[in-house]
Image (spheres, helix red, strand yellow):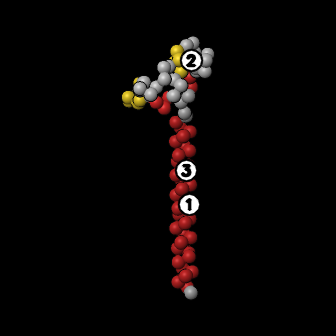
């Protein structure tokens, strides 16, 4: 596994791939889990996925709350206009 001391200097080449640039220091190659390198954990990518159903429910709830708030503001504006017209 390699440790890049200045990852901001890497060049994005697409599809989540990066390459070294002239500003990139020499990568420190070594055993995973040593010298500040991360560990290689089997199944870590699969377990990091989000629960799409829960996220969809959260998005629908947020949208409903937004619509309710927008309707409340519209109603308040209508009431204010009615009060102003009464005077």
Image-quadrant location for residue 11: top left
Classify 84 as above or below 62: below
Q: Report which residue position mark 3 lands on.
A: 62
Q: Report which residue position mark 1 lands on.
A: 69
Residue at 52%, 62% in the rendered image: 70
Q: Is label 3 in a helix, a strand or a loop?
A: helix
Q: Is residue 63 left or right of residue 19?
A: right
Q: Is label 1 in a helix, a strand or a loop?
A: helix
| Nearer to us in this view, 4 or 68 | 4
Classify 11 as above or below 43: below
Q: Report which residue position mark 2 lands on.
A: 40
Q: Is label 2 in a helix, a strand or a loop?
A: loop
**Label 3, residues with CA under 10 Å away: few <14, some 14-19, many ≥20:** few
Q: Estimate the x, y position of residue 17 in percent, counting from the top left.
A: 42, 26
Image-quadrant location for residue 10: top left
Q: Nearer the viewer, mark 2 or mark 3?
A: 2
Q: Estimate the x, y position of residue 21 in percent, counting from the top left.
A: 41, 26
Classify 42 as above or below 76: above
Which label was assigned to residue 51? none
Residue at 50%, 19% in the rendered image: 27
């Amino acid at each position: 596994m390699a440790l890049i001391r200045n990852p901001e200097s890497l060049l994005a080449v697409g599809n989540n791939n990066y390459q070294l640039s002239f500003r990139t220091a020499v990568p420190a190659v070594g055993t995973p889990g040593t010298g500040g390198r991360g560990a290689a954990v089997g199944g870590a990518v699969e377990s990091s996925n989000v629960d799409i159903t829960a996220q969809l429910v959260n998005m629908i709830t947020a949208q409903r709350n937004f619509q309710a708030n927008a309707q409340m503001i519209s109603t308040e504006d209508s009431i204010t206009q009615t009060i102003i017209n009464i005077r």
